[in-house]
Amino acid sequence: MGGTGCARWLVVGAISIALAALAAPAQVWRSMGPPGGNVQSLAADPHDPRVLYLGTTDGHIFVSRDGGDSWSLDGRAGPRLDGVVDTILVDPRNSKRLYASEWTLNPAAGGGVWESDDAGRTWRGLGLAAQQVRALAEAPSDPDILVAGTLGGVYRSADDGRSWQLISPAGSEEIRDLDSLAIDPRNPEVIYAGTYHLPWKTVDGGKRWFPIHAGLIVDSDIFSILVDRADPQRLFLSSCSGIYRSDTGGLSWVKVQGIPTSARRTLVIRQDPLRRGTIYAGTTEGLWKTETDGASWRRVTPGNWSINALVIDPRREGRIVLGTERLGILISDNGGETYRTSNAGFNHRQIAAVALDRLHPRRVLAILSDAPDPVVVTDNGGATWKPLGPGLRWESVRRLYASPSGWWAALSSGGLLSYRGEGERGEWARAGELVGEAAWTFQGGRLVKPPRRAFDLVVEDMGFSRNGWYAATAYGLLRSDDNGATWREVRFAPLILPARSVAVSADGNRLWVATEHGLAYSLDAGRTWSWHNLPPSAGNALRLSLAGPETLLALTPKGLFLSYDGGGAWEHAAHGLPEVPVRDVAAAGDTFLASLDGGGLYISHDRGHTWSPVSGSLAEGDFPVVAAVPGSALVYAASASDGLYAVELGSGSGARNAVASHASPSASQKQR
């Protein structure tokens, strides 16, 4: 009898989950920027140089079909979020076939060589998955031959990557930790390998190797090797000690003069396809150019630009596309005399924190960890972004908040900053004072009570209502009745308990506080308290979120727990959610969105009862923050690498219109 009942329950549960999945609308992701970010690699289609491919440090491949003027996200080479795409190659026989080399930030995870047959949309492994592949080259005279440089040595494939052979001595202490490769344009048996410790050469496809060190400073990493297309005996290479030239196929080298070597690394060297004597060197201190075969050089960018990749258009004289750290894509149409930013569609910012203006939903504040201006704001749903004043660094921010009267930032080291002023003319400044019992502090080895004390406590969470603001700190729960100017303690009966998170109703009468001793609940703005603890299996709540008048969400070490009666009874959100910690959760009506530790987004259309993964490559990314727009069918998802997205969670025309009003149409895309 019990078995039958259990089976019936399982069938009913399966039907409920299936019906929820059928009813769930497709999610539409709209990229909001901010534009720009870190570019790791660039490649051009040899048949159509207007088609460019861009590789990133999280496996993503962007494509441009107009010479770099605009970009779109095409796919991901490999499944890992820490896959660094160091090289992209376009097969000269088939423009839709791409190769990519990848290494991971976790050395034990390998990387490999990846192949796409549909111009970068989908990828499959092509071997060397256990290897960190730091360089990849295709033989110009025989495209069937690929050579890969890894931490363990040099590998060669003679069949388009279907099989690989180690062609450097196994276990070699010298030919390992590869940074660069080059193949003679006429003879595929001649291969140059740049290692962590000087360059090496083979003239018989790897059977024998010999050092080509004469003239080089010892202990030089070889970042890039260039073989002259017209004279294979003429080489350029870059190392941490500068740029060198050889006219003897590497048998001897002469250091190129004219470029300072202090505090610089030359990461890429390229020869102008229309002017043989013109060579560009991309360094960590700008782009350098010679028009005299290296006899003299001049810097043609600001010195604070760090150049990771560059492409020179063979059909449009003077057109250079630069891939940089932090600044994204920069293009020159006059050989480096002037530049313009070209990041339309390339949204690859690392967002450290985000806050939504509850009175103006199209206004979003973001803290960026990879941008010249770390604090940016959009007033029009991502159509444009602008800096928001000085005084705040991304590494100092713990969390951002939008109070009823403006922006606030909780600092990792303790204390609060508020934004004062309007637009770029304003600034971030320390704010808040502790008064009353909260102002007690140790001075000279004893506890004293000054009349006032600057707010210097670490804030774990903040909550805002019409009648008061709250801050959860290790000292306890604090309250401000003057828009954050002064803060005083809130006692739980006779106790002061460390507070981890706070949720407050709009009118301020109901308060929920997660403490180290359980979940405290007040119906009278904190004057009296009761305890509504989570189930013992959940542990203590790490963060609380209010998803409706009586719907409370609790993030715990054991996952997400939900209460539909204001904290009286709780259930584990386990139907469809993996058994990993939930990083953040947001609610828009009956639809909830959860971001997971380790990456991935999950969605529920029935107020958290059942969950399913959000489809699409973007949803596989790492999203530290998801936040709901009050009163709409939107949430914002802040990516650790791809900027900010507005996600449509509703299915009605009102939701679609809301999404359209919150995102730039030119940056929108239906996620595959």
Image (tube, rainbow, N blue to C red):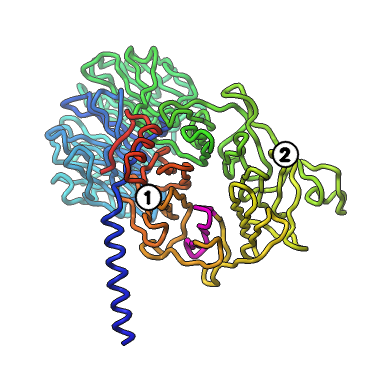
Local crowd at mark 1 within 10 Å, few (<14), some, or many (≥20)?
few
> Which residue is under mark 1?
173
Q: Which residue is depicted at the point 55% across and 55% down? A: 544
Judge whether residue 236 is colored magenta.
Answer: no
Local crowd at mark 2 within 10 Å, few (<14), some, or many (≥20)?
few
Give, as a single range, the part of the protein colored magenta: 545-563
One can see residue 246 in this view: no
Image x and y of residue 93, in percent? 12, 34
> Which residue is under mark 2?
482
Left or right: residue 528 versus residue 391 is: right
| Magenta segment main secondary structure | strand
Q: In the image, what residue type sits under mark 1?
A: Glu
Q: Are marks 1 and 2 in contact (CB under 8 Å)?
A: no
Image x and y of residue 169, in percent? 28, 51
Q: Which residue is depicted at the point 61% across and 49% down? A: 461
Question: Looking at the image, is 330 positioned above or below residue 91?
Answer: above
